[in-house]
Amino acid sequence: MKRPVVKTADKRNWEKKYRSPDLRNADFSSISGRPLEPLYTREDLSGFDVDTELGYPGEYPYTRGIHPSMYRGKLWTMRQFAGMGTPQQSNERYKFLLAKGQTGLSVAFDNPTLYGWDSDHALSAGEVGKTGVAVDSMADMERLFREIPLDQVSTSMTINAPAAWIFAMFLANAEKQNVSFDMLRGTLQNDILKEYIAQKEWIFPPEPHLRLITDLMAFCADHVPQWNTISISGYHIREAGSTAAQELAFTLADGFAYVEHALRAGLEIDDFAPRLSFFFNSHLDFFEEIAKLRAARRIWARHMKEKYKAKDPRSWLCRFHVQTAGCSLTAQQPKINIIRTALEALAGVLGGCQSLHTNSMDEALALPSEKAVEIALRTQQVIAFESGAANVIDPLGGSYFIEKLTCELEEEAERYFQKIDELGGVVKAIEQGFFQREITRAAYEYQMALSRKRKILVGVNEFINEDEHLEIPILEIDESVERDQIRRLEELRQKRDNQAVRSRLDALKKAAAGTENLIPRLLDCARVYATLGEISAALINVFGEYQEQPFY
Amino acid sequence: MSVEPMKVIIAKPGLDGHDRGAKVVARALVEAGMEVVYLGLRQTPESIVNAALEEDADVIGLSILSGAHMTHFRRVKELMDKNGLGDRLLTGGGIIPTKDQEKLKELGIEKVFGPGDDIQAIVDYIRTWHRSRST
């Protein structure tokens, strides 16, 4: 898709004046290292077809947005990722955030939960409740969502390896709240491929995880129709150090891999594709991020329509959540992070996100304090109601720079898709360490650029405050959280019907060894208060555990 | 005085999977001429110290961003002392609050690194330690 660049006399005049010796000695490339022109003009878009490549919002190829009315119809959901300590503490934080005006919930789990282990697992020591909420059983789900109407507020859960059984516990709790499954709205992250690539929260080798993902897609298509079964993620890939183009390409490649897996499993594309969703980072290089999000929509639409032949237009939509970049935030002069987050949030909005999380200023130091997360939420509200960014759809559309950058990112992504195909697909590429090495190389190059001051990080390698000391409150997770969780687990194991737990875990194991959909079995286990770790152990028994070969 | 390149173990004990820093440090140390044994994720203090014994490592570097640093650093130091590695360097990085850095100093872990630290500073710290040890 090479576009010829034709220079006119006027541009040459300007270029002569531009090429003076007085340019600043600075790096003008993007934060990803992308070389940028000093100016973009209509010549950069010669060959660009406005009708087929730009189009209209809510119409194929969706470059300008997935809905015809975008934010005039409905603002993005303000959805702050939150979780800490015990389910009760997290429940209080959710109520706090809803009272402050957020419009959707997002659950952060602690490390043991993310790995599918109970709070009393030997390796959970020191980790319980530290990075999110500890959930060991449906009893914890009951505590987590106490007095929160699940039929009125949508819930996103950032969980991957044990996503299916955490979801089973969520469903079982909804049952107890008398909320029917077809009323439930929300998202499960449930994206195992990016775990092997970046976030590193796996249990089994890829195939069993992929089976569970496809089972969940099929189950939700029939029983939980408003649920987004997967949030195909680039956020973590970017946090691990990738460039914007890598984030875009690797995320969509993962998406295509899930589509292909589901098709091979016999699902109809239009039955599951409308409930696929995405999750992108919004990093500091403002325009690159906006272009990246626009490119994502166009690429996904094209492939879903033309390659995978989806007929339902909802299958063509790249709906996505955005989180501002945690890795861009600093421990030094943390209040400045408020500004970084604001710029990143604005880019996410101008890029047309469906929901948004803004990081708190204390990101590099601890889980968010109440004051810090309030400011983060208010950032979104200022953007939504004061800045005018929500008044006009895709306001940067038609900008020479933005359209050119969108095209460039699309082209780079296509080159990566080809490379991944040559390696035999996503799973094979993971085994060969392709993604991991690309990401580490980009991370290393950025770090060296910082070290050499070719890239600047305010407060860290420039504009440093010597002898600065911490002025903001820092949230601490008390060690009693771990003791409490362990005690509750012991009580639970005594009070529940252990016979029922054993027989349902056995039934799960039998089903896992076969091919039936595992979600109903997982629901059975959740209802009788089988713990997360017990379910994981039962499945490990059948599926085995994954061993990573570390690439750097 | 040894003319062999310094051997450094880089490992992530416990459940924290954020390995960007560990990998970038590993690369930087390799670029600086050191030999790096990158153990990766989900290591235990036992597996780390065993590797250090097997490799006769000079340095162990732990990366912990999960808040579990006191538990892991303490245990690794204990095992190092118990197994005749008390004279080797134990360092690391991650999200380690200042007051915990003070507690680590009391355990004999002189310095750990965190967000915003220059990669060259880490290389220099290890080199300087090695030099002072060989003289």
Image (tube, helix red, strand yellow):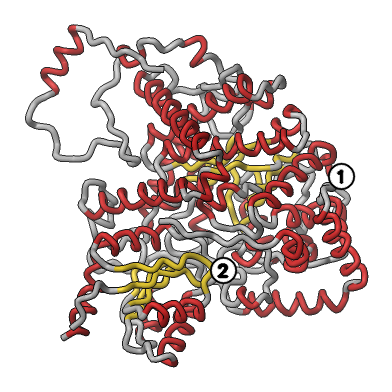
Image spot of residue A492 (x, y percent): 82, 74
| Residue ID at (36%, 49%) | A441
Q: In this view, does B77 lie above or below A413?
A: below
Judged from this view, the residue extending furthest toward the top is A9
| Disc 2 target residue | A130
Q: Is mark 2 on a helix, strand or loop?
A: loop
Name the one closer to the observer, A319 or A178. A319
Q: Mark 1 lies on which chain?
A: A
Residue hosting label 1: A180
Q: In the image, A109: left or right of B56?
A: right
Q: In which quarter of the image is residue A486?
A: bottom right
Identify which amino acid the numbered label 2 is placed on: Lys
Pointer 2 or 1: first along the chain: 2
Q: Tell me which residue sits at (30%, 53%) in the image.
A: A447
Looking at the image, how many numbered discs can be counted on the residues?
Answer: 2
Amino acid of disc 1: Ser
User: What's the residue at 63%, 21% (across, down)?
Assistant: A305
A166 horizontally vs A102: left or right: right
Q: How far apart are marks 2 and 1 (CA)?
A: 33 Å
Residue A546: percent from left, percent from top? 61, 60
> On screen, A267 above or below A241?
above
